[in-house]
């Protein structure tokens, strides 16, 4: 099964929303279905994918690494080469385009680490839509580079001060905004989760990844034996797997955040282990990591994009049916994979994607040399220098940050600040 059955994937999914949002969600579903059957919509989407996102993204044969491991041939789908540096733009552009066709003039979104906010802000700039991003105040402080990037793309970033001032609080505020302003506003959800039709919609817009892989491997004259993707909410994984879900081949592997190891609160593993339970939050049912009060629990991961408490309903379903095998990759294994791919192939994985890379490094040696494994590099690692540098070069990085601070405090190159602030008002 690829499509949901009335919004459900087995017992997961659904549309658990406040009454006031039923109509806007139904309108969205109708508009989405209409767009997907409208040749002019599909043509516009195709053009934007080619010229703005930079699709198709390459499929790269990691020959040196495959040779070293002595097992399956490893291929890497380079989603990190898409504009804005990750797969999230595929969905942001798709949904923004649907919203525009619906006559909406304003987009809202929530973001935790900021990556979805960046993709949404870029998509809105490209399509001339107003953009507001909700972000927990704690996250705003932690993710300044992404906040600055969103503002560069012209988005308004709102720091949410309610609750624990993190992602779940930002989601609440975005929901409230939507319920008040749905006439001119679309709520652009960033992963394959939330109330139906979002999981179907996000999978559809991300499935371009899987279709390209299918064609690119066929062009190389190779069959695919295994595919590996990291799973936060699950958008890159479900899009990458989409053309293959209905079959029994290739084998599909999802890499979850194993954090610092087993134990509640030490990771973000919803499928591996027994910490997750069925729950309904944020408009849908899935396996959630909850605290003793049934609220969103504490998770831990080196990668900000994989620490979500839930998992897309379709992935939860396909995990339980056994179509997708899940594995938990620890922080240190992911870091090691970043280093291995960088040094052997000249490819810098994002920390999230490195979880998939690490799993591929484990699988390949157990397979034969004439077998092929495709890894989705969902994003590139430039954004992670604040995580990787303190690990790989702790002392030098501290010195660098100190020097930067001194330079800024001396005020030498911030004399543009005032004029830039007023330039686009
Ligand atoms: C956000 C993000 C993820 C996790 O989100 P999914 O919806 O699970 O794909 C993975 N990789 C990168 C690079 C991201 O930015």
Image: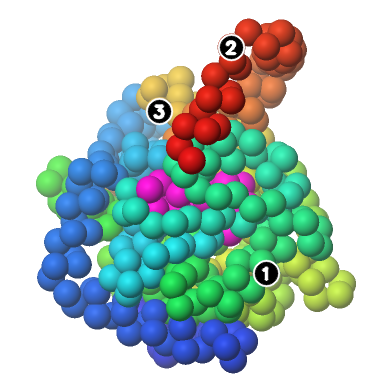
Q: Is residue 196 above or below residue 101?
A: below
Report how far apart the C-alphas of labels 1 and 2 lie in the structure. 39 Å
Out of 404 and 263, give the one closest to the viewer: 404
**Residue at x 47%, y 89% (from the top left corner):** 23
Residue density around tag 1, few if under 14, some if 14–19, many if 20 or more, within 10 Å:
some
- Residue 141 percent across, percent down from the top left: 72, 40
Q: Which residue is mark 1?
A: 172
Identify the residue under disc 3: 347
Q: Which label lies toward us, 1 or 2? A: 2
Question: Picture coordinates of residue 59 (x, y %)?
Answer: 26, 40
Q: Earlier in the sequence, mark 2 or mark 3?
A: 3
Q: Residues within 10 Å of mark 2 (few under 14, many from 20)?
A: few
Looking at the rendered structure, the secondary structure element under dot 3 is loop
Q: Earlier in the sequence, mark 3 or mark 1?
A: 1
Is residue 132 among the parts visible in the rendering? yes
Q: Look at discs 3 and 1 and give the one toward the viewer.
A: 1
Residue 13 position, x and y percent, is 53, 81
Coloration mode: rainbow
Residue 239 left/right relative to 41: right
Instruction: Answer whether residue 117 is magenta in the image.
Output: yes
Q: Where's the N terminus, which quadrant? A: bottom left
Secondary structure mostly seen in magenta is helix
Give the labeled residue for mark 2: 413
The percent position of residue 382, horizontal first and vertical second, equals 49, 29
């Amino acid at each position: 099964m690829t499509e949901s059955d009335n919004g459900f994937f087995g017992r997961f999914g659904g549309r658990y929303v406040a009454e006031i949002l039923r109509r806007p969600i139904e309108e969205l579903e109708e508009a989405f279905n209409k767009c997907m059957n409208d040749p002019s919509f599909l043509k516009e989407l195709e053009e934007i994918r080619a010229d703005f996102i930079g699709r198709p993204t390459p499929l790269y044969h990691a020959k040196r690494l495959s040779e070293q491991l002595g097992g399956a041939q490893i291929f890497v789908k380079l989603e990190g080469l898409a504009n804005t540096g990750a797969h999230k733009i595929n969905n942001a552009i798709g949904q923004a385009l649907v919203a525009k066709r619906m006559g909406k003039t304003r987009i809202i979104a929530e973001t935790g680490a900021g990556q979805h906010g960046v993709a949404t802000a870029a998509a809105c700039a490209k399509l001339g839509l107003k953009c507001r991003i909700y972000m927990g105040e704690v996250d705003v402080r932690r993710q300044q580079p992404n906040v600055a990037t969103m503002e560069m793309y012209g988005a308004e970033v709102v720091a949410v001060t309610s609750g624990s001032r993190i992602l779940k609080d930002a989601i609440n505020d975005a929901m409230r905004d939507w319920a008040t302003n749905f006439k001119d506003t679309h709520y652009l959800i960033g992963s394959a989760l939330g109330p139906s039709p979002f999981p179907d919609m996000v999978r559809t817009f991300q499935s371009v990844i899987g279709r390209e892989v299918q064609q690119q491997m066929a062009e190389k004259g190779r069959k695919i034996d295994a595919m590996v993707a990291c799973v936060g909410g699950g958008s890159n994984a479900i899009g990458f797997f989409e053309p293959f879900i209905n079959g029994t081949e290739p084998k599909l592997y999802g890499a979850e955040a194993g954090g610092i190891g087993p134990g509640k609160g030490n990771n973000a593993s919803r499928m591996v282990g027994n910490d997750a339970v069925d729950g309904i939050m944020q408009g849908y049912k899935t396996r959630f990591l909850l605290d003793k009060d049934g609220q969103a629990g504490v998770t831990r991961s080196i990668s900000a994009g994989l620490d979500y408490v839930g998992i897309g309903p379709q992935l939860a379903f396909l995990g339980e049916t056994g179509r997708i095998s899940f594995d938990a990759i620890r922080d240190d294994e992911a870091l090691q994979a970043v280093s291995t791919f960088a040094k052997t192939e000249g490819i810098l994985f994002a920390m999230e994607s490195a979880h998939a890379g690490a799993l591929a490094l484990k699988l390949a040696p157990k397979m034969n040399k004439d077998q092929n494994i495709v890894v989705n590099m969902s994003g590139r690692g430039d954004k992670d220098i604040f995580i990787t540098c303190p690990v790989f070069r702790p002392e030098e990085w501290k010195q660098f940050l100190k020097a930067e601070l001194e330079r800024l405090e001396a005020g030498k190159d911030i004399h543009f600040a005032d004029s830039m602030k007023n330039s686009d008002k």
